[in-house]
Amino acid sequence: MQSIMTRRTAARLFFIIGFLSMALGYVFFQGSITNVSGVFLLISSLFIILGAGCAVIAIKLKKSSLYLFFAAYALQVGVFILLSSMEFIPVEYSRFWPILSIFAGIALIPAGWYRYGFVKIRYIVPALVFIALGSILLIFSLDVVSYSLAQFVTEWWPLLIVLLGLILMLVSLGTKKTEK
């Protein structure tokens, strides 16, 4: 019984030390950045703190995959805003809105794994759909291709039907058969 208490105490101590070192490092990191707007640093910090808080709630308190989804999503958005405000990503925010869909798809994968202990198709298919949709919209938002989204849909609509069929087939393959 005593060894369990000391392990639990050591785990809490490691958690507190890890959290304090992360917070201290982040404060020093923000202090070393000179050419970044304070508003964007505040917004990115709030998203990162929200993500870390949701991760703690997901893993330690609630054991919920929904909190892990929000944690992964908020951390991605916070890091993206931080990198964009540091001008590592040299495009304005208004053109990067489809990346939020990509972040949602990426955040679904660890949430599904945490809930079931392995990756299930009911999480992978929506994750891939979010990632594909965000990627397609990002291509048009950044003007990588020479024609508009409306032209793409009117010319390539049969491909969209094929993709819908593929998604439905993947969903049907992932369902379990129940025998009576």
Image (cartoon, rainbow, N blue to C red):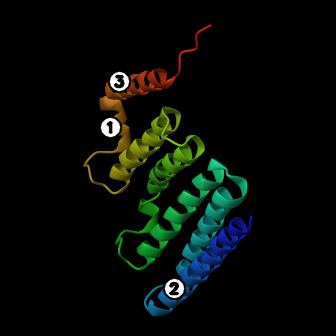
Q: Is residue 91 above or below residue 30?
A: above
Q: Label 2, label 3: how many angstroms apart (C-alpha)?
A: 49 Å
Three-letter amino acid code at the position of disc 3: Val
What residue appears at the point 42 percent right and 26 percent down from the top-left corner?
Answer: 170
- Residue 25 is tagged as 2
What residue appears at the point 51 percent right and 90 percent down from the top-left corner?
Answer: 28
Q: Earlier in the sequence, mark 3 or mark 1?
A: 1
Tell me residue 78's x, y (percent).
52, 69
Which residue is outermost to the left? 146
Tell me residue 112's x, y (percent).
54, 43
What residue appears at the point 60 percent right and 68 percent down from the top-left corner?
Answer: 52
Three-letter amino acid code at the position of disc 1: Phe
Q: Label 3, label 1: how many angstroms apart (C-alpha)?
A: 15 Å
Quarter of the image for the N terminus: give it.
Answer: bottom right
40, 6: nearer the viewer: 6
Q: Label 1, label 2: how many angstroms apart (C-alpha)?
A: 46 Å
What residue appears at the point 49 percent right and 41 percent down from the top-left corner?
Answer: 118
Q: Is residue 108 above or below residue 41?
A: above
Tell me residue 147's x, y (percent).
28, 45
- Disc 2 secondary structure class: helix
Tell me residue 47's x, y (percent).
59, 69
Q: Earlier in the sequence, mark 2 or mark 3?
A: 2
Task: Mark 1 vs mark 2: give the one in front.
Answer: 2
- Residue 152 is tagged as 1
Q: Is residue 129 above or below residue 89?
A: above
Q: Residues within 10 Å of mark 3 (few under 14, many from 20)?
A: few
Three-letter amino acid code at the position of disc 2: Gly
Task: Mark 2 vs mark 3: give the one in front.
Answer: 2
Specify whether 137 is left or right of 69: left
Which residue is the site of mark 3? 162
Task: Mark 3 vs mark 1: give the one in front.
Answer: 3
